[in-house]
Amino acid sequence: MAARLGAVAGVAGASVADQRPSASLRATTLALLAAVPGLPLILSAVMPASAALPAGVALAGAGALLTAAAATLKEKPAPQKSFAEELAAAATPAASPYDLFAGLVTLHDARGFVTAVHGRDRADMLAWMRDPMGRGYLDQIHVSDRIGFLAAIDRLRQGGTRETVELRIDRPRIEADAEQFTHMRVEMTALAGADGALAAVVAQSRDMSDEARLRGESARKAAEAESANDAKTRFLAAVSHELRTPLNAILGFSDILAGEYFGKLENDRQREYVTLIHQSGSHLLSVVNTMLDVSKIEAGRYELMSEPFLVADSVKACEQMLGLQAREKGIKLTSRVPRAIGEAVADQRAIQQVLINLVGNAIKFTDRGGIVTIDATREGRDLILTVSDTGIGIPADKLALIGQPFMQVQNEYTRKYEGTGLGLSLVKGLVALHGGSFLIQSRPGEGTVISVRVPADGSGIAQENDLRPGPASTVEFPPRLAAVIETVYEPSRDGKDTNDERARQKTA
């Protein structure tokens, strides 16, 4: 209590929890203490001096004690503040929460006029922008982008909550090589009033010039690549057409010389040379026709003539055309076609071209004593044509490259034999035009099995009425090649084929 009185009186060294009483309380306490000598004098007028002195002192002391007690009950100690609260109180408050947002933050009214400017990067952006207040922001937008900005404001006015637009903001040319416009992405959020109507729009504008530049470069490179591909296709078509004209004369005149219609040749060496000329011309004509077909498929101008035909006849025709080549190399060429396979509806010329290319490749990459087999089966509504061989096979890391135009697997075998690398590319394109699929399975040193599946009823071929622009009518060329690294045929446990024509065992 003495300490409390000392604190109330302002005596040095007296403190209670470092708290000082109010000025009014200290004045009252000092007045009571000053009354200690005055009260006995006043009381001595009505009572003896011996009784007035102790009574006055007692009354003054009692008043001081009551005043101190009252101050103790009324004044509560201030609560202790945490370190975070003290740090927050000491920090300088931000002018607006919007000043913490990245970019330039502008507040717009329902007309799109700017009413306030904030943002963390406000100083940097306003260094090259003009004053955006009022119509200033709208006037700096590129003329063709203002419609999009005002349309976004209108959608927010009609009840929308958020919009995002990309704008070009006029930038004064401080440097000669500086861009005239800065690309900005503006994200707008609607602030509704008490009545639900649009009260304000918060727009956060951020610089996206680098992103716009990258998108422009990507679009430019894509256009250049497409132009280069079109130029390549046109080049192939032009060269192919130009080559066919002299080839007709070479083949025709070599036929006449070989037939000795205008006189006999003097010796066998001349006959051999004429034969080589005709063979070389025929090979070159085949390459030219393949290049023309590939260019037509890439340009989307290859026309299929759908008609019903006997599958067995197409397989037999292919076998007859390439049988001599297989016999000269010492390879056995066989075919297995069920009698009940019947007809298929497709472009017979294209199907025969597929078989010729597949069988020709199989013969080319199969050593003497090997076997090349052509199989044809029906599975539901699909026709499946399979060409298998016991040749060199294809490494696993090269399967993804097979089927690309002018692409060959570079090893000792492909260097020995001529070819353009267009055969499988043409096969894939023709199969895709029929709405079919192409599967290659191979193991190095064991052989290769290539299967072609096409709808046997011709349903996969786009009709003339369906040939209109759009994703549904486009054909990916070259189509993606599904590669499976495994052999196809496995022998039955009893050594017999138990699935009739569909069970096939590849033997060496």
Image (cartoon, grey):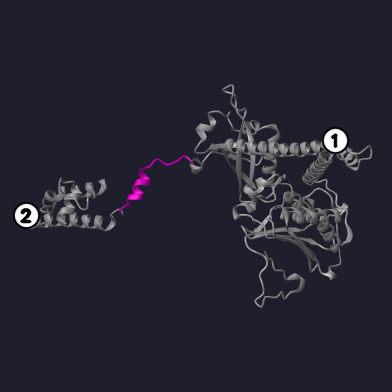
Residue ranking furthest to the right: 262
Quadrant (top left, top right, bottom left, bottom right) of the N terminus = bottom left
Residue that numbered label 2 is attached to: 49
Q: Nearer the viewer, residue 64 or 149?
A: 149
Amino acid type of the residue that numbered disc 2 sits on in the rendered structure: Ala
Disc 2 to disc 1: CB gap under 8 Å: no
In this image, 329 relative to 170: left or right?
A: right
For residue 6, say whether it is visible: yes
Residue ranking furthest to the top: 176
Which of the labelled discs sits on residue 468, or is there none? none
Q: Circle 2 — which element?
A: helix
Q: Is residue 131 above or below residue 279?
A: above
Q: Which mark is in front, 2 or 1?
A: 1
Q: Quadrant of residue 419?
A: top right
Q: Nearer the viewer, residue 89 or 183?
A: 183
Residue that numbered label 1 is attached to: 246
Q: Residues within 10 Å of mark 2 (few under 14, many from 20)?
A: some
Amino acid type of the residue that numbered disc 1 sits on in the rendered structure: Pro
Q: Residue at x 35, y 43 (%)?
A: 90
In this image, 20 relative to 404: left or right?
A: left
Q: Quick one: label 2 or label 1, which is nearer the N terminus?
A: 2
Q: CA gap, disc 2 to disc 1?
A: 155 Å
Q: Which range is magenta? A: 80-96
